[in-house]
Amino acid sequence: MNPRELEPLFKPRSIAVIGASTKPGKIGHAIVKNLIEYGFKGKIYPVNPKAKEILGLKAYPSVKDIPDEVDMAVISIPAEKVLNAVKECGEKGVKVLVVITAGFSEVGNEELEEKLVKTAHEYGMRVLGPNIFGIAYTPHKMNATFGPKDILPGGIAFITQSGALGIALMGWTILEEIGLSAVVSMGNMADIDVMEVSEYLAEDPNTKVITIYLEGLKPGTGRKFLEVMRKVSEKKPVIVVKSGRSERGAAAAASHTGSLAGADKVYDAAMKQTGILRALNIEEMFDWARAFALLPLPRGENAVIITNGGGAGVMATDAAADYGVNLMDPPEDLKEKFRKHMPWFGSPKNPVDLTGMATPKEYYGAIKEALYDERVHSIIVLYCRTAVCDPMELANVIIKARDEARRDGIEKPIVVSMIGGEDVYEAMKHLNRNGIPSYPIPERAVSALGALLRYARYKGVVKQ
Amino acid sequence: MNPRELEPLFKPRSIAVIGASTKPGKIGHAIVKNLIEYGFKGKIYPVNPKAKEILGLKAYPSVKDIPDEVDMAVISIPAEKVLNAVKECGEKGVKVLVVITAGFSEVGNEELEEKLVKTAHEYGMRVLGPNIFGIAYTPHKMNATFGPKDILPGGIAFITQSGALGIALMGWTILEEIGLSAVVSMGNMADIDVMEVSEYLAEDPNTKVITIYLEGLKPGTGRKFLEVMRKVSEKKPVIVVKSGRSERGAAAAASHTGSLAGADKVYDAAMKQTGILRALNIEEMFDWARAFALLPLPRGENAVIITNGGGAGVMATDAAADYGVNLMDPPEDLKEKFRKHMPWFGSPKNPVDLTGMATPKEYYGAIKEALYDERVHSIIVLYCRTAVCDPMELANVIIKARDEARRDGIEKPIVVSMIGGEDVYEAMKHLNRNGIPSYPIPERAVSALGALLRYARYKGVVKQ
C-alpha cells in the first residue's frame, strides 16, 4: 500500500460528522463535542437533516451540501442508512470514511459490509471500521472518537481491535498520564487493517512506539502480517497484546470478533521472528511503551541497579534474571567510585546499595558515576521511602543527573521504581512527566528495561 | 513455643520507649509520636535521662523509674548502650523487647547480638529484632514503628524481613487502601522469628491472612520452617514473597541479611507442600491478600465471567488458563437465565458477554443469576467504561447483589476488574471499601481468584 493514502485519516483538513446530533449522550453528539473541545484545527461540518446548528456549528442536511472540500467523513447513523451516505460521500469527493456504525459482519451481516467497502472503493475512498469508536491523532489535535476527551499527547500510538476495551483504556491512559500520539479503533477491519495503520505510523514522526491490542487476523493474512510487521519493526518498536492465548480464550475471541484467532504458538513464534514485542497484558504493554516513548535505547548489555533498600535490590535482581537484563559486575575502579556515595556498610557491587541512610545527594553521586562510566549502559534506580530522603527531591536529582549527562552527549536509559505512599506517587508522576519512566514495583521497571534491550538487540544496537 | 509468650508483643498494656527523643526527625521521637497519634490505648512511658517531658508525656531517666508495670520496651539507643538497657528492663520485669537499634549481626557484630539475647532470656524476656523499624497491631491501635502513622485497619498481617521495603510498603498500603491487622519488622531475628510470629497470628482473630516478605532463613531451620508453616497454613492462608529466586538475587539477599538464601527450587517445592501460596512480587502478594481478607473461599471449581467487553472477557479467559481457574460451560437452563440480561447479540456462554449496551441493571440481573445458581461457585465481574454504564452505579449494584445473596445465606467470592479513568478508579476504591476486591486489569482479578482456589483445594474446601 501507499501510506500516503492514510494521510486524510490522520491529518484531515476537514471532517464531516454524518449523524451529528444535538442530543447529549448520543454518539453523534459526543464526536462533534470531542472534535471541538479537543481543539481540532481543521474544519468541522456536522451533517443532520433535522438540525440547523449543533454545538454552535452550522449543520448541513447532507454531506453534499457542505460548501467546502471534505477529507474525512465520520459516519454514525443506523446501519441501513450507511450505504446511501457512503454514496453521497463518494459524490462529494470525500477521501476517507470512519464508519462508527455497528451491525455489519460482527452480527453476521457480511453482505452489507462488503457493499459498504465496494461502494467506497468505487469512489476511491478508504474505510476505517465499521463498528469502531473512531480515531484520534493528537499532534493535529484531532479527537474523532466518542471516547474520553482529554487524551494526553505523547509518543505512543495505540491500535485496538476491541472497541469497549479501547475506549476504557483511553480513560485509563489519562488517569495514568500515558501520552498518546494516536488512538485507532479497528473494528471489523473491512478495508483498512492493522498492518496498514502500522505502516503509516512507522513513518509518522510523532509516533515513537506502536502498541496493538490484537484479537485475531483475517484468514489467509498471516504471512502478509509477518512481512509487513517485520518492516514496521525495523523502523519503530511494536508491542502487541495478542489475546486468545489459551484454547478457550481463542474460542471466545473468535466468537467476539469473528476473526480467526489461530494457534497461539504460531503467533508467538511469528511475532518473535518479526521483532514484535509481545506483552502478556495491557499493563505490561503500556509499561514497556512508556519506556520506549521516553528513553533512548541502551547501547550495550551492562545494567546497574542503584538502591537504598536491600530488599528492593534483591527483587530487581531476580527480575533481571527473568527479563534477560544483564547486571554487570562492576570492575574495582568503578566500585571505588560508587563507594564514595555510601556509608561503610553499603555495597558497591551490583545492586549498588546506598543503604537506608542515602539522601538525594548520594543518589545523585552514584547515578552520575553510572552515567559517566562508559562500561555502564543502563541504570535502574530503586527507592524505598525513608525519612532521610524526600521522594520529590530524589526525583529532581535524577532528572538533573540525566540532563547534565545529556548536555555532555551521554544518553542512557534510566528506569525508576519507587515504593511508598502519596508523596512517592507524586514523585513518580513528576518523573514520568519529565521523561523518566517510573513504576510502583521494581519488577515492572526491570521488565520495561528488558523490553528496550530485546528491541535494541533485534535492531543490532546491542551486539548479541 | 507457646504463642501466649508473644501476647505482650501484640497487646502490651504499657510500653516504655527507651531512647525517646524530644527532637522531631529522630527515631525515638517518631515512635512516641506514632504511639500517641495512632491512639494506643495502653500507657506510654518515654525514657530519656535528659528530658522531663516528650510530646506531652512525662519522661523517665530509666525504665526502672517508671511507677507502673511495663509489658513492652521499645529500644532505640546506640548499640553499645543496648546491653545495659536490656539489663534494666530485666530488673524492671519487662516482658518483651522491641530492639530498633542496628549495628549487630548485620554488620558482623554477632557477639553483641548473642549477649543481647542471652541477657534478655536470663530475665525471661523475649526479643524482636534487633535492626527493625518496630511493630504495629491495629486492633489495639498500637503503632510502635517509626514508619507511616495512619495504617489502615484490616485483616492482613504483614511480616517483613526487609526494613526499608517494609516501611515503604506501609506507606504504599495506605495509598492503596489495603487494610492491615499487624506489621512486624523481623530484622536480624536474633530471638523471635517468622515462624513464631506466624504461629501467633494464626490464632489471632483479627488476622485473616498472613503475608511474608522473606529473604532467607537461618541455617538449619528449614525443616522446622516447613513443620511450623504447615500448621499455620491449616489455620490461615499464608502468602510469601521469597526473593533471591535467581542465583544472583540469592547472593544479593545473602549479603543483605546475612541469612542463607538457599536453593530456590528447594524453597519452592517446600512451600507448595506446606500449603504456602508463593507470590512472584509484592503487588501480587497484596492482590491475593486483599481477596483473602475480604472474600469467602469458593466452595467449588466453577467460575463465571460476566463482562460488558468482549476483549476484557478474552483476556480474563486467557488468565483463567494461566492461574488454574476453571470456567464452567453453563448448562442450557443457566444460559437461558443469562440471556434475559443481554441484547440478542450478547453471549450467554462463559464469558457471559452483556455487550457494551449493558447498564448496571443488566449487570445486577446477571450477577444475581450467578449468585443464586448452585452450580456457580465464583464470579469474575469485568467492566470497560462505557457511556451507558456509570461505574459507581455499577459498583453499588454489585454490592447490593452480594448483600442480598448474603441475607439468603449465599456466600460466593466476587472479584472485579474495571478499566477506565478517574471515575472508574473511584468506583474500584468504593468496591474495595465494601468488601469486594477490585483490580485495574482483568488478569490481576483472575490471579487473585486463582489463589483463593489453590488454598480452598489445599484445605479440602474444594474437592480436587
Image (cartoon, coloured by chain):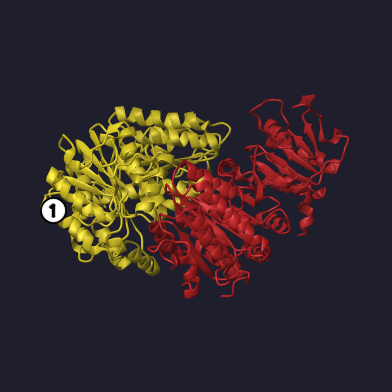
Chain colours: A yellow, B red
Residue A177 position (above or below residue B276): above
Q: Residue at x 22, y 49 (%)?
A: A197
Name the residue carrying label 1.
A121
Amino acid type at circle 1 is: His
Horizontal and vertical percent for residue A259? 28, 64
With A128 as the anchor, is A55 left or right in this view?
Answer: right
Residue in front for this viewpoint, B215 or A105: A105
Q: Nearer the viewer, residue B37 or A207?
A: A207
Residue B452, compared with residue A177, is above or below; it is below
Q: Is A238 left, or right, of B255 in this rendering?
A: left
Which residue is rendered at x = 38% and y = 57% of the image?
A: B311
Q: Where is residue A138? Give x, y as percent.
A: 29, 37
Q: Residue furthest front?
A: A50
Residue A374 appears in the rendering: no
- Location of residue B313 by image quarter: bottom left
How dense is the environment of label 1, judged by Cα within 10 Å: few (below 14), some, or many (20 and up)?
some
